[in-house]
Image (cartoon, rainbow, N blue to C red):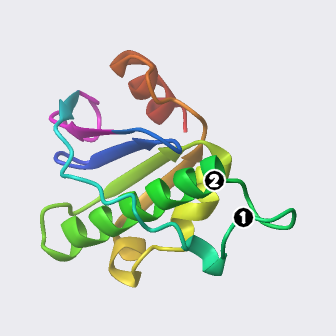
Amino acid sequence: MQLPNNAYVAVVDGEKLQLFRNDGDAGSLQLAEMQPPAVDSDNKGAGGRHASSSANPDDSQQDEDGHAAGVAAMLNQQVMAGHIESLVIIAAPRTLGELRKHYHKTLSAKLLGEIAKDLTGHSMKDVEATVAAN
């Protein structure tokens, strides 16, 4: 996948967020790690679920879903404020599913692609290689 200059890459799992910006051009990917804005992970009611029971996720899963909802809300805000013009999201498959529930239509319009892969904590070179291969 080729990314235009200033395209962002968000790498997300149920606990962490890494944010990168392409300082190169479409033909030469050069990611730079950015300090992500604060994420409000208190949205424990993600997906319309209620308190834990045998039919509902445990507290740790609710925490992960809350983090994904918070990341989506932060990305929505950044896109709508004009800070992010194009975006690729790389997330663990379950986290990606939860993120999708919270995308604003403006974010969806700026989304260049999604990659279902857990890369949080991996090197920037691993992230670059994954983006380039997709």
Q: CA distance from mark 2 to mark 1?
A: 7 Å
* Magenta-drawn segment: 18-30
> Disc number at residue 59?
2
In the rendered image, residue 60 lying in the magenta stretch gets the answer: no
Q: Residue at x 56, y 58 (%)?
A: 65
Residue at the disc numbered 1: 52
Badge 2 vs badge 1, beta-carbon distance below 8 Å: yes
Q: Which of the 4 image quadrants contains residue 2?
A: top left
Percent across and percent down for residue 5 are 18, 45
Q: Quadrant of residue 106?
A: bottom left
Neighbourhood count class around disc 1 (C-alpha, 10 Å): few under 14, some 14–19, many 20 upward: few
Rendering quarter of residue 17: top left
Residue 110: x percent and y percent?
Answer: 34, 68
Horizontal arrangement in the rendering, residue 1 relative to residue 50 (left or right): left
Are there few (<14), some (14-19), or many (20+) residues within 10 Å of tag 2? few
Magenta-colored segment: predominant secondary structure: loop
- Decide which of tag 2 and tag 1 comes sooner along the chain: 1
In the image, what residue type sits under mark 2? Asp
Left or right for 86, reference 59: left
Camera sees residue 3 = no
Question: In the figure, 111 relative to 12: above or below?
Answer: below
Q: Tag 1's secondary structure?
A: loop
